[in-house]
Image (cartoon, rainbow, N blue to C red):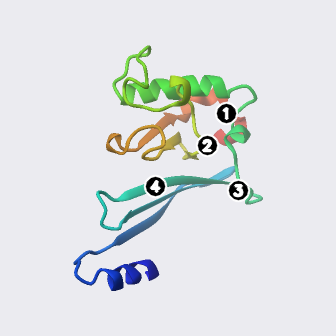
Amino acid sequence: MTEYQQFRREHEDLDQTWSVSKSVKVLRATHPVISLECSDWSDTGGAHGYGNTVYLNFDARSGASVTLSSILKDGSLPRLTTIAEAYFRKMNKLPPTASLAEAGFNFAGDRFKLNDNFGVSEKELFFHFNRYEVAPYYMDETTIAIPLTGIRDLLRPDLLR
């Protein structure tokens, strides 16, 4: 509010409004992981607004942060990455051998990589790439939803109780 009030004082002749929206959605509230999807959107009158989505994951007993490695069986990340890449390519209508860079994505070394922005529901594991993270603004944000039933062998057993 302070920034907006300062802007209005400096630009009295402009009839411009700003907006902000924030939300939190509970994805999972059962043992062993509590998972929240936190989203925000703001528009300060520029060329376009900007949104961001972050997942927060907590141990249901201790409240400690939960990392991806703590819900995966040891050594499972490479296989999960391969599965997630297949979902990503399907969503973006990219053949398995197509260059990500030529399609407009900016993964380091032109190789798909999972980020740490993940959430867990009772049925799916989500990975979210915000705008500008792996692609230009116009390509939008991307959420990959992987059914837990398809990756059961990669997850620690207590996640699927």
- Mark 3 — residue? 60
Q: Position of residue 8 (x, y in %)?
A: 33, 82
Q: CA distance from mark 1 to mark 4?
A: 27 Å
Q: CA distance from mark 2 to mark 3?
A: 19 Å
Q: Nearer the viewer, residue 154 or 118?
A: 118
Q: Quadrant of residue 82?
A: top right
Q: Secondary structure at mark 2?
A: loop
Residue ID at (36%, 26%): 103
Q: Identity of the amino acid at label 1?
A: Leu
Tag 2 or tag 4, which sits nearer the N-term?
A: 4
Q: Is residue 62 visible?
A: yes
Tag 1 or tag 2, which sits nearer the N-term?
A: 2
Please say if the residues under marks 3 and 1 sit with CB atoms less than 8 Å apart. Answer: no
Q: Is residue 161 visible?
A: no
Q: Quadrant of the N terminus?
A: bottom left
Q: Is residue 152 left or right of residue 40?
A: right
Q: Nearer the viewer, mark 4 or mark 3?
A: 4
- Mark 2 — residue? 116
Circle 2 residues within 10 Å: few <14, some 14–19, many ≥20: some
- Mark 1 — residue? 155
Residue ID at (50%, 34%): 146
Tag 3 or tag 2, which sits nearer the N-term?
A: 3
